[in-house]
Image (tube, coloured by chain):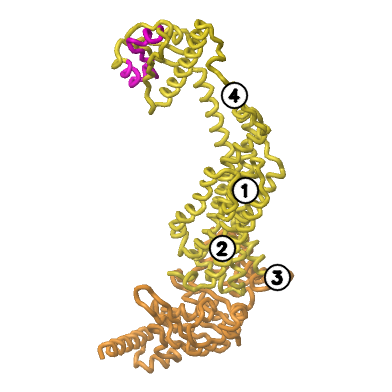
Chain colours: A orange, B yellow
Amino acid sequence: MIEANKLTKTFRDRKRGLVRAVDRVSFNCQPGQIFGLLGANGAGKTTTLRMLGTLLEPTRGTATVAGYDVAKHPEDVRRSIGFLSNGTALYGRLTAREMLEYFGRLNGIHNSQLRSRVDELIEQLEIGEFQNGRCDKLSTGQKQRVSIARSIIHRPPVMIFDEPTTGLDVMTSQTIMNFIERCRDDGLTVVFSTHIMSEVERLCDEVAIVHHGKIATEGTVSEIKAQTGEDVLENAFLKIAHQLDAQAEAELTR
Amino acid sequence: MSLTKVIFLKELRETLRDKRVILGVIISPLLLTPALMGAIMFFGSKKAVEQQQATLDVGIYQEAAFPELTNHIESNEKLEVTRYDSREDAIQAIRDYKARAVVAIPHNARIVFQSNGTAPIEIIYDQANENSGNAHNRLRGLLNQFNREQTENRLTASSLDPSFIKPTEIKSTSIAEKSAVVGFALSMFLPYIVIMGAAFGGLNTAFDLCAGEKERGTMETLLVSPASRTQIVSGKLYTIFVISLISSICSILGIVLALSFGGQIIETIFGEIPQISYTNLAALVVIVIPLALLSSAALLIVSAFARNQKEAQAYIFPFVAVFLFPAALSFVFGAESPLYTGLIPVLNIALSMKQLLSNAFDLPFFSVALASSLAYAWASIKLTANLFQRETILFRS
């Protein structure tokens, strides 16, 4: 499971001074559940996920992933997560099989088990036909399948998806969304960031709307709609965002 | 298998599949460098022979007859002599490439010559024209020969022995073996080429392994794996180091090949076919190791700092200066340089190579150079590892 407790990330920007990219973000995500972070570009979703993935160190606050503290046991955290973002992030000059073997070894899978695990994923994700093709020669859909296999090669209990469908065609997006659903069905803890409302409605058991680094509201999609009095999630999201912007402006003029 | 080794082996495999690296690190130094050096030596020696043997068009402009001198010039079979009536015509002929150089004889020259004085003779030529310069040198040689002959005639006429104007006979005896002379000549340019190989051989690899990974998004995937930042930076650094070392060794082998195939040409220049002993070759490789480490770490710093490969290319100019300037300084410093130069990075490696090649090996200097280079390499590696811990560097946007 994932527990984020007042996660905060600030950084210094030459033009804007001290920027609070993530401001006291707290949420819980249980195994077998998909927790969504919904927000516009620059809202702080990626920074939050990078803190959970131990790529960035929180300025304040704490988080535990699969029982490990992100600040105290980063390597254990990384061993427990699969991370998939919008880019396929494959090594062009490696073959699909070599790519999987590489990440298997990085995740500590012993050589004796590595071959069978790679074969299993190749069969499961239908990579067989192009397993010996160089990654830079594969189609986007094929790359995405290799990327998925890469993220789960070590059977992580937690999956983190950072806008995984951005820039992908409908078919490839469907593959990703089916994969996210399967992760939940397999009992994994899933955190998923997006700005696409339809994906949230289809996938998320719980969602947090992130705006200017803060969680504006949190609940199921139905609860958020009811809370705002809107039937469409997009309208609910916009209503919350506008309210927060108006509040912020009023505070500034006060 | 340690994660550093896993990363190193993967990076090396991927790098060796990069055609740019194969071309720049192996094919170019092993084939192109010897071919280019061979071509330069071939055409250089061919031109030198041609210049010595070619018949040159020269001219004579005389305000008064000086048959002793003009006959001496005209009797030379390798000169095609044309007479000019005025100085202006002579200069115009040089400008029109009809004459390469002209000997101008003033009206009083013969009178002065016959009265045992020093006759003023002028050679008019175009210093900006290589062929004209060669003709000038040929004519000057011919006039010097005329002077020697006439001096002897004057001494004989005065019943004096030629030794009268030559109080001493100077003879130079070099104790250096011919191989050492050839080694000295090699030491002038070989360190520069090897340093360039070490410094720039790993350039494409370094940019690909860090700035390139950031650009393609694979860096994030790698950082989120269980490998620690130190393991990642070590794996990448070892890869760049191996490529830099291969590049340096190929540069050395390329020169050895050039010397083997161009031996005949070099023999005509130095009088001996040059050979580098296996011991010296091994010593060259040893001394280049810390340099390859230093340049690999420096390249990785540049690559880590850049957001993409294009930006890394922009940062390369200061790096080039840092390595090129000390390497170029090795042309100025002799092999017997003061001990403190052993502390100057890159230059110390170049000077150690010079010493090895010209049989001027100096153990204290070599030790200082090796130790200080290893220290600089260690500091650079620490700095690189430190940069990899900094979010502001790895996630610059």
Residue B340, above or below B3: above
Q: Do callouts 3 and 1 mark residues in contact (Cβ within 8 Å)?
A: no
Q: CA distance from mark 2 to mark 3?
A: 42 Å
Q: CA distance from mark 3 to mark 1?
A: 53 Å
Between marks 2 and 4 in the image, the one whose residue lies nearer the viewer: 4
User: Of callouts 2 and 4, which one flags the residue occurring earlier in the amino acid sequence?
Assistant: 4
Q: Do callouts 2 and 1 mark residues in contact (Cβ within 8 Å)?
A: no
Say which amino acid is labelled 4.
Ile
> Would residue B61 be visible to someone looking at this image?
yes
Mark number for residue A41? none
Mark number for residue A116? 3
Helix, strand or loop at label 2? It is helix
Q: Is residue B156 magenta?
A: no
From the viewer's side, name the closer residue of A185 and B123.
Answer: B123
The percent coordinates of residue B121 (x first, y second) are 38, 16
Say which amino acid is labelled 1.
Ser
Please give the residue where the numbered disc 4 appears in the rendered image: B170
Q: Which residues are magenta?
A: B90-114
Other residues around mark 3 within 10 Å, as few (<14) / some (14–19) / many (≥20): few
The answer to whether marks 2 and 1 sit on the same chain is yes
Say which amino acid is labelled 2.
Ser
Please give the residue where the numbered disc 2 appears in the rendered image: B380
**Total marks in image:** 4
Q: Chain of mark 3?
A: A
Q: CA distance from mark 2 to mark 1?
A: 21 Å
Say which amino acid is labelled 3.
Ser
